Image (cartoon, rainbow, N blue to C red):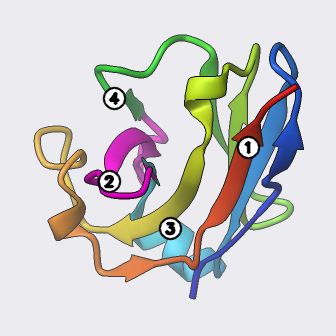
Amino acid sequence: QLVESGGGLVQPGGSLTLSCAASRSTLDYYTIAWFRQSPGKEREPVSCIHPNDRSTEYGGSVEDRFTIARDDAKNTVQLRISNLKPEDTDVYYCAAGRVTSNSWSNPLWYNFWGQGTRVTVSS
C-alpha cells in the first residue's frame, strides 16, 4: 500500500515536499516512482529511486527543481519540488514496481499505485 501526502496550494516560487509512505519491505524490493497527471493527459514520469543502490532517475521534462530521496526512518520516499511554477499543477502519484533504468518511465510496469495528491500552484 502506498500513501501520498504533502500536496496543497502553493504560490509560485514556493517549495513543497511530497511523501510516499510504504512498508519497509516494499521500499527494499520495488523501485518507487513519482508520476504526475493533468486531466486528459497521460501520466508523466517525474522521478524514481531504485531499491538496491538508491540510484535515481528523472524524467526528460523534469527540471533540476525536483529531488527524490528516501527516508528510512520514516519509510517514505520524498519528492521535493522547489521554485514551483503554475505548470507544476497536477495530481502526483507514487508507484512501486520492479523496473530498470530503461523501463522506469512507463507506468504500465508498476504494480502498485497510491491515490494521488494534488498540487496546485497559483497566486
Q: Which residue is mark 1?
A: 120
- In the image, which is nearer the foreground, mark 3 or mark 1? 1
Q: Which mark is residue 32?
A: none
Asked whether the beta carbons under mark 2 and mark 3 sit within 8 Å of each other, the answer is no
CA neighbours of label 4 inside 10 A, class few (<14), some (14 to 19), many (20+): some
* Image spot of residue 16 (x, y percent): 82, 36
Q: Which residue is mark 2?
A: 43
Name the side, left or right, on which 39 lies relative to 71. left
| Residue at x 65%, y 25% (from the top left corner) | 86
Q: Check disc 4 and report its element: helix, strand or loop.
A: loop
- In the image, which is nearer the foreground, mark 1 or mark 2? 1
Q: Which residues are magenta?
A: 37-55
Closer to the N terminus: mark 2 or mark 3?
A: 3
Amino acid type of disc 1?
Thr
Amino acid type of disc 2?
Arg
In 3D space, how far apart are the residues under numbered discs 2 and 3 (Cα atoms)? 24 Å
Closer to the N terminus: mark 4 or mark 1?
A: 4
In 3D space, how far apart are the residues under numbered discs 4 and 1 (Cα atoms)? 20 Å
Q: Which mark is residue 59?
A: 4
| Residue at x 56%, y 55% (from the top left corner) | 92
Closer to the N terminus: mark 2 or mark 4?
A: 2
Q: Which residue is mark 3?
A: 28
Amino acid type of disc 3?
Asp
CA neighbours of label 3 inside 10 A, class few (<14), some (14 to 19), many (20+): some
Give the position of the N terminus as an image quadrant: bottom right
